[in-house]
């Protein structure tokens, strides 16, 4: 849990500070924001903290049996589609009553971004976010809450709620994001691997980005 606190504090504090100073350059700000996070992750995975050493393998980062892990990611992605559609319909019904629902990326896509901007958005959504979020939420937070409450379901629900809450979609986005996070927790629990999770997360974000690229121009 202490390691998780270090990483999330780095994200909110150091990342925000870096964004503030780099903003004047107006170039790849988001990439600089995540640099301190990955430095914190690398440090926490390299040195013992309070005499306890966390290694990549201990949190599920291993490429053994990679085809099997890829299969889990693909199967979970397609299995989650009907679940997500149900939650999207529910969210649409709650749109009048709950705030939120938008995402800064949607605004960028509405403004006809240049190819390099699209490449940056895709890299952040399909590489950066899946790696650090899976290490933090399913590699550290989910197991920590599971040990705390002695039940994987409670650990999954609490870590998934926090995952959904830190995203900028507001209250309206929580049901759909929790559905995504709970599937990621299930895959992590069954496979004991973050590799499957990272690939599943990347597939989900990539599909969402492609759908946005198709749908958003039609809404102008």
Image (spheres, rainbow, N blue to C red):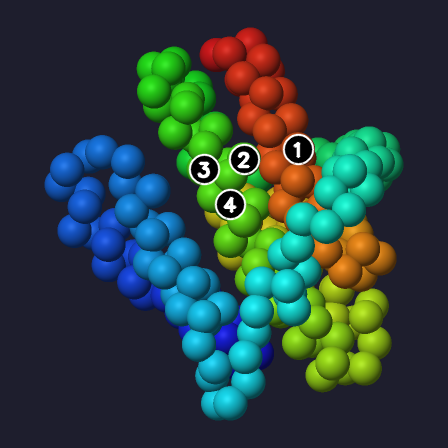
Tag 4: Cα neighbours inside 10 Å, few (<14), some, or many (≥20)?
some
Q: Position of residue 15 (x, y in %)?
A: 32, 57
Residue 158 visible? The answer is no
Picture layout, residue 28 above or below residue 14: above
* Mark pair 1, 2: CA separation: 7 Å
Helix, strand or loop at mark 4:
helix
* Mark pair 4, 2: CA separation: 7 Å
Query: Residue 7's image quarter?
Result: bottom left
Q: Are marks 2 and 3 in contact (CB under 8 Å)?
A: yes
Picture layout, residue 126 above or below residue 64: above
Residue at (72% x, 83% y) in the render: 148
Residue at (77% x, 46% y) in the render: 65
Helix, strand or loop at mark 3:
helix
Q: Position of residue 97 (x, y in %)?
A: 64, 45
Q: Are marks 4 and 3 in contact (CB under 8 Å)?
A: yes
Mark identifier at residue 126: 2
Q: Are marks 4 and 2 in contact (CB under 8 Å)?
A: yes
């Amino acid at each position: 849990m202490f390691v998780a606190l270090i990483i999330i504090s780095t994200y909110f504090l150091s990342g925000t500070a870096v964004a503030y100073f780099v903003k004047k350059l107006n170039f790849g700000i988001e990439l600089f924001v995540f640099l301190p996070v990955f430095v914190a992750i690398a440090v926490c995975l390299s040195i013992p903290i309070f005499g306890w050493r966390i290694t990549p393998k201990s949190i599920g980062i291993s490429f053994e049996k990679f085809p099997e892990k890829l299969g889990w990611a693909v199967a979970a992605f397609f299995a989650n589609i009907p679940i997500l559609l149900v939650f999207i319909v529910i969210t649409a019904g709650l749109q009048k009553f709950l705030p939120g629902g938008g995402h800064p990326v949607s605004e960028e896509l509405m403004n006809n971004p240049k190819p390099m901007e699209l490449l940056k958005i895709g890299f952040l959504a399909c590489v950066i976010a899946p790696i650090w979020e899976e290490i933090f939420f399913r590699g550290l937070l989910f197991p920590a809450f599971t040990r705390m409450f002695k039940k994987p379901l409670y650990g999954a629900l609490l870590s998934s709620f926090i995952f959904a809450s830190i995203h900028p979609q507001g209250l309206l986005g929580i049901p759909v994001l929790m559905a995504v996070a709970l599937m990621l927790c299930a895959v992590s629990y069954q496979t004991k691997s973050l590799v499957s999770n990272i690939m599943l997360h990347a597939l989900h974000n990539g599909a969402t980005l492609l759908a946005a690229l198709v749908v958003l121009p039609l809404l102008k």
